[in-house]
Image: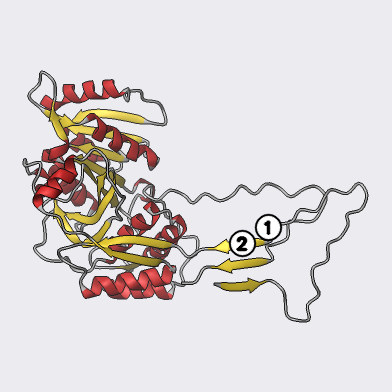
Amino acid sequence: MHLCSDSQGPNATPHQAQTPAAGAPPKLTAPDLQLVARPALSIAEPCKQAAPADWDAALDSLTQWLDIEVKRTPMPRMSRLRQASGWSAPFATKAQPPVFAPWQCWSSVMLQQPDAADPALPRANWVGSYLLDSGAAKPLQRNRPDVLLMSPLPGACVIADHQDVKIPRSGVLRDMLAAAQGEARQKLVIMVDAQQRNAMVGSLLLLGRTVASKEHTLDVVSVESGLCELVRNPARWDAIIVMPNLRGLVFALLAEITGIKGPWPMLWHHRTISMITAEGLEENAGPAPLDAALLIQTLALAAAHAGNVAPAQRLMAGAARMWDCGIITPGRGSVAPYVTEIDDQEFIAQLCRGVPGRRNATWHWRAIAPMRTPASGPAPASGPAPCPAKLRLVSPS
């Protein structure tokens, strides 16, 4: 443990307590001790398809730049019977860190498998993928899409009463709605086919979630109407809930109209976040090539959900300055006439070295909540300002 004193040397005079004059307000002093802890991030390594060397090196560079201590734990191997019994367990015995594997790209088609206990699918009830259009000089900056695309897994759906259609279980639907509200997403839509619409409205009525206001809206539309609205305006909704059999259509349309053909960050939810991967139009047989934007976004999501909001904000702000300077990667193109395209490894290296761009490069991602800072009110009318802490305890790395 390191001790950092605020004194200026061995000959410095000690701080003398001064008696306030009669009638003067008492002097405000700060705590004499501060504990500065290094942010930590616990992740689990996947049993299959370990991190490629380029992904591992890029992740180490980013975490060292952010001064985050990464604790990696091996994921325990489970048999099919144990995995299936774990799916049906009502409560988890111990919270496990999420598996961090953004080099694993899952296709939307895999989520449409009818087998609820398919061992190829990770353990989850629903998934959420993020579309953040934050490239350099994109048109209509204020209308850039920032969408959370959610879907229940087939095993988390049930047949509606007196109707031969499947809808999400009430608890899963409630969790998806709560996740959208937790990220301050104000415009939510549920896309279903014609047979599912009445059953979905009935499920919402049971949850009591049909009340809309000027700040929050909740629409239940057919997939045909929803796709037409997205073509007119990709930023029409902040969050989209779509059934698994329709997910590929919505994903492909958003990828086409935004020009983002690369994979999106994907979170697998099972009571908590169980896995962080990527989602694309096609599933890769092996590890996907290094994608700087994908690694930055998935690492920011992992850090923010672990409580390290400040490093997540710093990471996204640094990437925003890179894009603002016109520095792009092959997976994130741009329509700007003056851009510099570099490979993903060089993008990570330049980000860690620092970008001499504008410090006020604006970015906003609803997936990362703004960091809460203690309210600092105005100083008292009379009397000195609070003095800084006299001793800081910095936890060792």
Question: Which is nearer the eye, 21 or 61?
Answer: 21
| Residue shown at the point (28%, 43%) measured from the top left | 271
The answer to which quarter of the image holds residue 389 is: bottom right
Helix, strand or loop at label 2? It is strand
Would you name the residue on which mark 1 appears? 31
Q: How crowded is mark 1: few (under 14 residues within 10 Å), some or many (20 or more)?
A: few
Q: Which mark is residue 89?
A: none
Task: Indicate the position of residue 344 as horizontal and vertical percent values.
Answer: 27, 71
Q: Is residue 158 left or right of residue 139?
A: left
Task: Indicate the position of residue 114 as horizontal and vertical percent values.
Answer: 6, 40
Task: Indicate the position of residue 90 as horizontal and vertical percent values.
Answer: 24, 38
Q: Residue 34 carries which label?
A: 2
Residue 227 appears in the rendering: yes
Work out whether 244 lies above or below 308: above
Question: Which is nearer the eye, 67 or 317?
Answer: 67
Helix, strand or loop at label 1? It is loop
Amino acid type of the residue tagged 1 in the rendering: Pro
Residues at discs 2 and 1 in contact (Cβ within 8 Å): yes
**Quarter of the image with the N terminus in it:** bottom right
Amino acid type of the residue tagged 2 in the rendering: Gln
| Residue shown at the point (13%, 43%) measured from the top left | 249
Q: Distance between the residues labelled 2 and 1?
A: 7 Å
Residue 250 appears in the rendering: no
Task: Indicate the position of residue 244 as horizontal and vertical percent values.
Answer: 14, 40
The answer to which quarter of the image holds residue 343 is: bottom left
Q: How crowded is mark 2: few (under 14 residues within 10 Å), some or many (20 or more)?
A: some
